[in-house]
C-alpha cells in the first residue's frame, strides 16, 4: 500500500503547490476532490492489479502450505520411528528435519520479497495511469486543483469527481489493453 500512499502524497503536494496561485486569482477557484481509495478499488486498472496480486498471493500460499505439510509429515514420521532408530539415524533425521524447516523459512522470505516486488511494480503502473488520468481530467475540465479526500477536513458531494475519474481511467485502460 506504499504506492497508494505515494499517490495520496502526490495529490496533496500538487494541491499545496498550486494553492498560492489559487489565492491570487480573482475568480473563485475550481476545485475537485477525488477519493483515491475508491478510484483504486473500482477502476478496471485497480481491479486487475488487485486480482493479479491476489492470484500470486494465493499461489505463494499454496506453495507454503505444501511445504508446511511436508514438514509436518516428516515430523510425524520421525516421532513414529524415534524409538526404533539408532542414535546416528536420529541425529541424521533431526538434521534433515531442521534443514527442511530452514528451507521452508527461506522459501517464505523469498516469496514475501517476490510479492513485495510484484506489488510495487503492479501498483506503480496503476499509480502512473491514475495520476495521468487525474491530471488530464483536471486540464480538460479546467480545474484549478484536484485534491485527495484524505487531505481535506470537509468537502461537499458536488466537488467529488471520483466516479468521473473511474470512467476516464477505465476508458484509458481499455485503450491500452
Image (cartoon, rainbow, N blue to C red):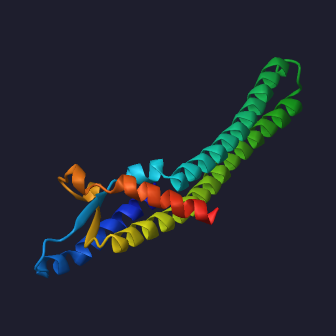
Quadrant where the C terminus sits is bottom right
Q: Quadrant of residue 88?
A: top right
Q: Count every numbered label the image shows and give the total.
A: 0
Tell me if residue 38 comes above or below residue 171 in the rendering: above
Q: Residue at x 19, y 75 (%)?
A: 19
From the top left corner, tell me how far across and down residue 39 is, in percent: 42, 53
* Residue found at the very far left of the displayed protein: 26
Nearest to the observer: residue 140 or residue 16:
140
Q: Position of residue 66 (x, y in %)?
A: 75, 34
In the picture provided, is 61 more to the left or to the right than 157? right
Q: What residue sits 58% from the left and 51% below the top?
A: 48
Q: Residue furthest front?
A: 141
Query: Residue 67 at what x, y percent from top left?
Result: 74, 37
- Relative horizontal placement of residue 128, taking residue 90 as reference (left or right): left
Residue 36 visible in rendering? no
Report if residue 79 is visible in the image: yes
Q: Is residue 50 above or below residue 169?
A: above
What's the residue at 61%, 53% (across, down)? Answer: 115
State the image quarter where residue 13 is shown.
bottom left
Report the side of 79 relative to 159 (left or right). right
14 relative to 106 in the view: left or right = left
Q: Position of residue 130 (x, y in %)?
A: 46, 63
Q: Is residue 131 above or below residue 94?
A: below
Q: Between 142 and 16, which is closer to the camera in this rendering?
A: 142
Please name the residue shown 69% across and 39% down the image. 64
Amino acid at each position: 500500500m506504499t504506492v497508494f500512499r505515494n499517490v495520496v502524497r502526490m495529490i496533496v503536494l500538487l494541491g499545496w503547490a498550486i494553492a498560492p496561485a489559487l489565492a491570487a486569482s480573482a475568480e473563485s477557484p475550481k476545485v475537485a476532490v477525488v477519493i483515491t481509495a475508491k478510484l483504486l478499488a473500482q477502476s478496471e486498472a485497480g481491479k486487475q492489479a488487485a486480482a493479479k496480486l491476489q492470484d500470486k498471493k494465493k499461489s505463494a500460499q499454496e506453495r507454503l502450505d505444501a511445504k508446511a505439510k511436508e514438514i509436518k509429515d516428516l515430523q510425524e514420521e520421525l516421532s513414529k520411528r524415534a524409538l526404533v532408530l539408532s542414535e546416528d539415524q536420529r541425529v541424521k533425521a533431526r538434521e534433515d528435519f531442521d534443514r527442511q524447516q530452514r528451507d521452508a523459512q527461506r522459501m517464505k522470505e523469498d516469496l514475501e520479497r517476490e510479492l513485495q516486488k510484484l506489488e510495487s511494480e503492479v501498483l506503480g503502473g496503476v499509480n502512473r495511469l491514475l495520476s495521468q488520468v487525474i491530471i488530464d481530467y483536471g486540464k480538460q475540465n479546467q480545474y484549478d486543483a484536484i485534491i485527495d479526500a484524505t487531505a481535506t477536513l470537509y468537502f461537499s458531494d458536488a466537488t467529488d469527481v471520483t466516479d468521473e475519474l473511474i470512467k476516464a481511467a477505465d476508458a484509458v485502460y481499455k485503450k491500452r489493453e
